[in-house]
Image (tube, rainbow, N blue to C red):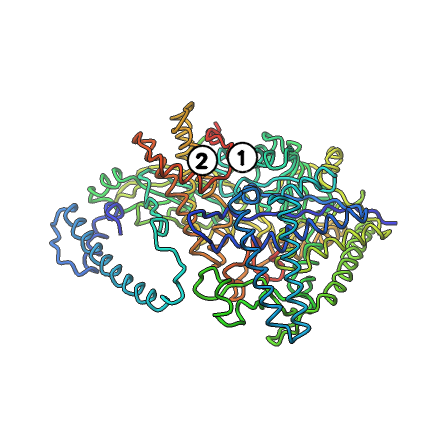
Amino acid sequence: MIQARMALLLNAHLPFVRHPEYPVFLEERWLFEALSETYLPLLRAFHRLEEDHVPFQLTMSFSPTLTAMLSDPLLQERYRQHLDLQLELAEKEMERNSNDSQASKLSKMYWLLYKQNQGDFNDVYQGNILRGFSYFLKKGHLELITTAATHAFLPLYQDYPEAVNAQIQTALESHHRAFGRVSRGIWLPECAYYPGLEHLLKRNKIDYFFASAHAVLNARDFPVRGVFAPLSLPNGVLAFPRDMHSSNSIWSHQEGYPSHPVYRDFYRDIGFDLEDDYLRPYMQGVDGRLATGFKYHAVTGKTDAKKLYDAELALGQVKEHACEFIADRVAHARQLDEAGMDRDPLIVCPFAAELFGHWWFEGTNWIEEFFRQLASSQAGLTLVTPSVVLPEAAEFQQTELSFSSWGSGGYAEAWLDGSNDWICRHAFQLVERMSELVERFPEVQGRKQRALNQAAREVLLAQASDWPLILKMGTTAEYAERRVKEHIANFTRIYESLSSNTMDTEWLTSLEKKDNLFPDLDYRVFRRHR
Amino acid sequence: MTRERLDGLPMHALLELSRKESLEVDYDLPRDELIGELFEAFEEDRRERESLNNLIVKMEQSKFAGLSDDKPEPTVADMDPRIPESYDENRISLVLRDPTWALAIWEVKRKDQKVSGQDYEFRGYGLKVMEHPHHVDALPDPAAKAVFLIPIPQALGTRYIHLPTPGRWYSLELHVLHDRETRFLRRSLLIFSPKELPANPLDRKGLGLHHKRMLELSGARACETNVKLPVSSQESLTVAAIPQRIGGFDDPEASA
């Protein structure tokens, strides 16, 4: 029988969006939707697996910006309010659809989803779902790792090792604070690597990272095991290559599972279909329309005449797709064996966590079903996490990788183009000035120290890869631009205040309250590397 | 247009601008005065544009007044944050985008701009692309050769530069151009343009059958370098959508 190992990775990340200065803030919904559709349903799936004694193992990376938001009392309270509104809307929807049994069933499905979320969030996790993931970490089902502090696209900062180091070191500290454990591995934001990065990883005691397929296929030496075994970099750090076939099984537009006609359609939402007056209480004061999360239609096909969603049909399809995924991996392992692969292949499948449940509504069910079917099958596929593989490091091929990312085009095309390249001048200047401040103020206390720590926070926040990507894609570009500018402006004001030895304490305090992540940050993390 | 930018322009460029702005100036007008007049003209244009914009904003607000009762009053936080236009430093950076393109970012400090601008032989600035056969720890590198010089009129800007030969090290030098000489100002750090590789790793030379088979099984035909950049669709413009980090779903393999 063919034997193969499989490592599933979910990268959970959202940019830091927290606006206490407003009573409600539209972009905070990114977090609320991910909580409702991905994180809480995923935890419920893990609990069901545990109750049924189904063995499951996977790796999850949590970005420090996300863990900061998930453990933030203000956002927790706002999520509770969001759930109240969603439940109110669900009740209105049940009444509106009371004469249509199929639609009414769907309204009830959403009511149940939000009711379960409310119960779990308040009663099981007391507002902080990181407790849930910590539980499965302790149980040995999850390996938790970090990513860069604000999910910066690290190759852009290769001239500034102090900036890259600050991203990594801050992330590790943040991870330890959130989960009480050391992260042995790292998810490089956007899977983006540049030669030399491994030195900073090693310096921070990181043993492994994940690499894009083409980084490995175009490595210095021919990768004799393709993408089906880790590669060892000259300093011993391991790179786990991404398998494109398993990735495409899920995310290919043509063949990917979420495009199946019976699955729930992402775009069709009552927020765009119903009357203004009816929806207004749920539009958060927005001029125009907003997706509410209440979506009643199935993908159906390339037509505007969408069929009503049938959850039972969709869950039946989930079973088929889980079965197909396992069968395809086994078939692939057999082909590798026939091609003369000299050891059991390791199939690495990294995905963005939020796409399960949020984008692909049935995605969290699919993950659960995948574990169930794998456990009951004799497929020869064994689940592993990277740290299980680390002791075998000496057996892996040693080579050097090239600059790469998993973005379209394979390099920095999405994060560096005419729509967003203006950021670089300022982001680089911020790093230089921050390092200069570290030299000027090597040991300070009190208000100056607070100002310097806040300056370091603003530098990190300005480096988030989300903003250039949003600017490139044209989605909520105005907000992204404003965020980058705000952090540049905040840093510059602190820098100038320190130069003139005057500081508006009230303003500094308000900034600390607003951009309140990384409470343990020490500005000296930006000390220049010589 | 800022005064700093005007300070950085050569005399002939200033005269050309004054012609476009329909300013009547004498050709023997001192440089500082010419810059002052140009600056005032640009400021007047700006004020006019802003007053028109405000009118549009006011009309828009009145149209939606009935819908925006619950919106908070505009506060200082609503204002567009002001960021520095320049940092008054001589600097140059070269940022690798992909194996053949890199972004150049440069700035000339005001004092140097002023000194250069007073010289009638001043012809602007230049970016000299330097190719290095090997990595070096310290610059300048005697083995480096200048592959081309790009004249740039502005003292501050960005520009994408085509890297002629993959698999080489590159740096960029910022120079002041005069009629008979160039003056070095600053150089960037080295970047390495990844070696020339076919978009499809299966096209790599010297592959045996086993190697080709392994690449195929590794998904070489579908790997990231073969994926085109997505074009954002109307559907993906949903305000509250989670930002898709890998690309739009209208793109076959862009999303993972």
Q: Circle 2: is it few (<14), some (14-19), or many (20+) Cα within 10 Å?
A: many
Amino acid at dot 1: Thr
Chain of residue at mark 1: A
Asked whether the beta carbons under mark 2 and mark 1 sit within 8 Å of each other, the answer is no
Label 2 or label 1, whichever comes before in sequence order: 1
- Same chain check for tags 2 and 1: yes
Report if residue B195 is visible in the image. no
Q: Which mark is residue A362?
A: none
Residue, disc 2: A456
Give amino acid for label 2: Ala
Q: Position of residue A185 (x, y in %)?
A: 65, 37
Residue B175 is situated, as x and y percent measured from the top left of the image, at 33, 41
Chain to which mark 2 belongs: A
Please say if A436 is above or below B5. Answer: above
Label 2 and label 1: CA atoms lie apart by 10 Å
Nearer the observer, B37 or B189: B37
Q: Disc 1 designates what residue?
A: A170
Q: Give the structural element (helix, strand or loop) at label 2.
A: helix
**Dot 1 lies on which element?**
helix
Residue B112 shows in this picture: yes
Q: Position of residue B176 (x, y in %)?
A: 30, 41
**Residue that sits furthest to the right in the current view:** A1
Query: Tag 1: Cα neighbours inside 10 Å, few (<14), some, or many (≥20)?
Result: many
Q: Position of residue A332 (x, y in %)?
A: 78, 54
